Image (cartoon, rainbow, N blue to C red):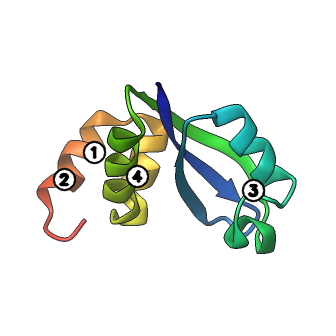
């Protein structure tokens, strides 16, 4: 069953990373304030990135990876800036 990793830009400007097997429903939940505590308190303003995976396990591994990135690297992913991603990946701790 396909699964998704997604990034939401929050009204505060922050980024929220999640994974799901039902992207449309999960995004609707976040926008209604029913997705999780984070998006209940700081509502999303837009879906800025999504990636499809074959299994939820793959999506969850990717979610974990992205959640540990610094903001600059997440923003490069959102922009699909592969050059910046490669540069940031070479830096320790990004």
50 left or right of 26 in image: left
Which callout, 4 or 2, points to the residue nearer the camera? 4
First-in-chain label (4 vs 2): 4
Which callout, 3 or 4, points to the residue nearer the camera? 4
Residue 9 lies, with reference to residue 91, above or below; the image says: above
From the top left corner, tell me how far across and down residue 69 is, in percent: 33, 62
From the image, tell me which residue sits under label 2. 89
Q: Residue furthest front?
A: 1
Quarter that holds the C terminus: bottom left
Which callout, 3 or 1, points to the residue nearer the camera? 3
Are dots 2 and 1 in contact, CB under 8 Å? yes
* Residue at mark 3 to residue at mark 4: CA–CA distance: 18 Å
Q: Mark 4: few, some, or many residues within 10 Å (few <14, many ≥20)?
A: many
From the image, tell me which residue sits under label 1. 85
From the top left corner, tell me how far across and down residue 10 is, in percent: 70, 61
Q: Mark 1: few, some, or many residues within 10 Å (few <14, many ≥20)?
A: some
Residue 20 is drawn in which quadrant? top right
First-in-chain label (1 vs 4): 4
Give me the disc on residue 63. 4
12 left or right of 93 in image: right
From the top left corner, tell me how far across and down residue 42 is, in percent: 76, 70
From the image, tell me which residue sits under label 3. 44
């Amino acid at each position: 069953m396909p699964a998704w990793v997604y990034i939401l830009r929050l009204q505060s400007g922050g980024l929220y990373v999640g994974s799901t097997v039902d992207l449309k429903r999960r995004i609707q939940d976040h926008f209604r304030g029913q997705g999780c505590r984070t998006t209940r308190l700081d509502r999303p303003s837009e879906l800025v990135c999504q990636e499809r995976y074959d299994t939820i396990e793959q999506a969850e591994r990717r979610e974990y990876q992205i959640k540990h990135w610094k903001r600059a690297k997440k923003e490069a992913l959102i922009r699909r800036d592969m050059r910046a991603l490669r540069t940031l990946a070479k830096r320790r701790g990004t």
